[in-house]
Image: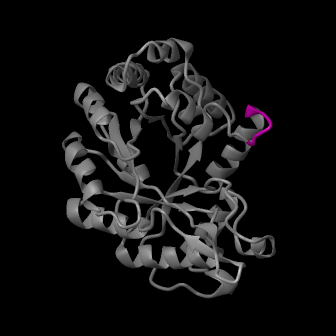
């Protein structure tokens, strides 16, 4: 299978890529297929599939005690990646995350993906929800750089406990995340870029940014990365705004600022139909400027909704 970095290098014009969510537990994969069917004519170069860890809940028992139960709201990242590859011939990029998955579970996922011939990954730490007991902490990776080390060793045929992994015909290639507005836990941008440089030096082929709505933040971030010797592609991640509620949801969930020009226009809207128009038009202008400034491609976060992304893609691709 071709590596994402090869697709980027060979692309003669800026490309489009997508990120999708696996369906909620119990739902049909055809909701995923509907999104890809809507967007495949714009020739997405790859499709990322998010990964979602389990969460613990406590169910009351008849005797007055509680039983701890692990649930996964969106299972099936590996299966969805395989289905996309089989149905569409597109290059799937499943997310592999630290939080909520043990080192052993990660190794099993790598073995399955290797068997399936899926050799492109997106490595992430994942959100910080408590998913394990304190005494189990050593079973999990704390940082994406630790996960990166496990992947690098696996590529060399070295599994956990120094077991030998045979049959790795195509080593895993991977991208990682970056944050034009700084990772929420980084003390400052210089520190954030320091660790980004470490990820690039240790084998990350490219980076995809968290969503942003102010292009100046992206351009400044890329300049600072290049000044520190980070020379791999930095792909902007973009998402149109659809609903007025996202004025608070997106900053809270994704730690992204929304420029006042955009925010005030959305606040003045009477309903979400007007919000969608403003969000799509802002996104088109944002992408036009990014493309004019020579970005390698644009990565669209669909979050289960394809209409706005399709309208942007139709205009630009």
Q: Residue at x 36, y 64 (%)?
A: 81
Q: Position of residue 197 (x, y in %)?
A: 68, 44
Can see residue 185? yes
Q: Position of residue 82 (x, y in %)?
A: 33, 68
Tell me if residue 148 comes above or below residue 188 in the rendering: below
Q: Position of residue 159 (x, y in %)?
A: 61, 81
Q: How is the image coloured?
A: one colour
Q: Is residue 22 magenta?
A: no
Q: Residue at x 43, y 30 (%)?
A: 295
Task: Tell me which segment is drawn in magenta.
Answer: 185-189
**Image quarter for residue 89?**
bottom left
Q: Is residue 269 left or right of residue 189?
A: left
Can see residue 179? no
**Image quarter for residue 135?**
bottom right
**Image quarter for residue 78?**
bottom left
Looking at the rendered image, the quarter that the C terminus falls into is top left
Q: Position of residue 200 (x, y in %)?
A: 62, 49
Q: Nearer the viewer, residue 58 or 209?
A: 58
Q: Main secondary structure of the magenta part?
A: loop
Q: Is residue 218 left or right of residue 241?
A: right
């Amino acid at each position: 299978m071709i590596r994402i970095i090869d697709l980027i290098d060979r692309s003669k014009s800026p490309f489009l890529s997508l990120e999708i969510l696996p369906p909620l537990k119990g739902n049909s994969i055809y909701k995923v297929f509907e999104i890809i069917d809507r967007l495949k004519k714009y020739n997405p170069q790859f499709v990322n599939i998010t990964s979602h860890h389990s969460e613990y809940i406590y169910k009351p028992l008849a005797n007055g005690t509680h039983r701890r139960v692990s649930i996964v709201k969106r299972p099936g990242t590996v299966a969805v990646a395989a289905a996309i590859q089989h149905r569409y011939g597109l290059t799937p990029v499943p997310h592999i995350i630290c939080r909520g998955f043990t080192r052993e579970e990660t190794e099993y996922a790598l073995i399955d993906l290797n068997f399936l011939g899926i050799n492109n990954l997106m490595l992430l730490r994942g959100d910080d929800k408590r998913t394990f007991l304190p005494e189990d902490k050593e079973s999990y990776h704390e940082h994406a750089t630790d996960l990166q080390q496990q992947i690098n060793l696996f590529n060399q045929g070295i599994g956990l406990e120094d077991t030998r992994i045979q049959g790795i015909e195509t080593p895993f290639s991977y991208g990682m995340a970056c944050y034009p507005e700084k990772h929420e836990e980084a003390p400052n941008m210089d520190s954030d870029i320091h660790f980004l440089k470490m990820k690039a030096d240790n084998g990350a082929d490219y980076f995809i940014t968290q969503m942003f709505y102010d292009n100046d933040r992206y351009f400044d971030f890329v300049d600072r990365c290049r000044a520190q010797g980070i020379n791999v592609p930095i792909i902007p991640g973009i998402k149109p705004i659809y609903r007025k509620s996202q004025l608070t949801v997106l900053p809270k969930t994704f730690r992204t600022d929304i420029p006042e020009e955009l925010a005030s226009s959305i606040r003045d809207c009477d309903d979400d139909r007007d919000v969608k128009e403003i969000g799509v038009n802002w996104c088109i202008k944002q992408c036009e400027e990014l493309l004019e400034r020579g970005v390698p491609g644009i990565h669209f976060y669909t979050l289960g909704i394809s209409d706005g992304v399709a309208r942007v893609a139709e205009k630009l691709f």
